[in-house]
Amino acid sequence: LVIGSQCMQQQSDVASLIAAVRALGVPTYCIGMARGLLGGCNDPPTVFRHKRGAALKESDLVVMCGAVLDFRFQYGASIGSRARLVVVNKSWAKTMLNRPPSLSVAADPALFLGALGALRPAGCQWPAQDDWMRRRREDDAAQDSSIREKGEVEPASLLNPLHLCLAIDNVLTQDSVLVLDG
């Protein structure tokens, strides 16, 4: 599941969107304005942040909700050729952009996810994906480690932006609000 910015357009429905995605329990990447939707360090084990391209290449089914197949997805080429592709977007034309989907849905992607989450019966288990999920967790851990290593480097001059961001992250609480201008 790829959750994009369109899912965040109705701020009053964000709690319902979070509940629906958690109920689905499928591997999820949040992009654009949806980054951080499911929390930072408290992400459920099905939410990933790094190496999205590798995950999409190995997927059997990709559901794009409120995101388009643009340069970030190599115009659809980053998704494995055998994968079924479902694209949900408010714009019918954007559901068909760059790679024909197996199913295109012209609808509000947040409402779509809410309805989909409500359809999953309690206790329903998805087929075992242990190896695939393990690789995603390893990819995330390796990338997080690489970011931390790069952030530890203090240059002789100028500022290491990763060092600054990691220092800020160390003092933030879960309910912190950042206001940035730049």
Image (cartoon, rainbow, N blue to C red):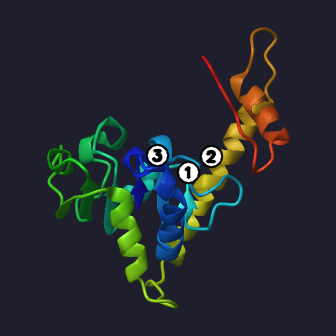
Distance, label 3 to label 2, CA atoms, is: 17 Å
Distance, label 1 to label 3, CA atoms, is: 9 Å
Residue shown at the point (67%, 52%) measured from the top left: 40
Residue shown at the point (32%, 49%) measured from the top left: 78
Nearest the eye: 63 or 145? 63
Q: Residue furthest top?
A: 157
Q: Tell me: residue 26, above or below residue 78.
A: below
Q: Residue furthest front?
A: 12
Mark 3 / mark 2, whichever is N-terminal: 3
Mark 2 Cα-neighbour bin, 10 Å: few <14, some 14–19, many ≥20: some
Mark 3 Cα-neighbour bin, 10 Å: few <14, some 14–19, many ≥20: some
Residue 165 position within the rendered picture, expressed as x and y whole percent measured from the top left: 73, 31
- Amino acid found under the numbered disc labelled 1: Arg
Query: Comparing marks 1 and 3, which lies closer to the viewer?
Result: 3
Image quadrant where residue 110 sits: bottom left
Mark 1 / mark 3, whichever is N-terminal: 3
Secondary structure, mark 2, is helix
Q: Tell me: residue 126, above or below residue 82.
A: below
Query: Comparing marks 3 and 2, which lies closer to the viewer?
Result: 3
Residue 118 position within the rendered picture, expressed as x and y whole percent measured from the top left: 41, 79
Mark 2 / mark 1, whichever is N-terminal: 1
The quarter in which the C terminus is drawn is top right
Nearest the eye: 91 or 158? 91
- Amino acid found under the numbered disc labelled 3: Ile
The quarter in which the N terminus is drawn is bottom left
- Amino acid found under the numbered disc labelled 2: Gln
Residue shown at the point (75%, 49%) measured from the top left: 175
Residue shown at the point (41%, 52%) measured from the top left: 7
Question: Which of the numbered marks, if any, corresponds to residue 49?
Answer: 1
Q: Which residue is mark 3?
A: 31
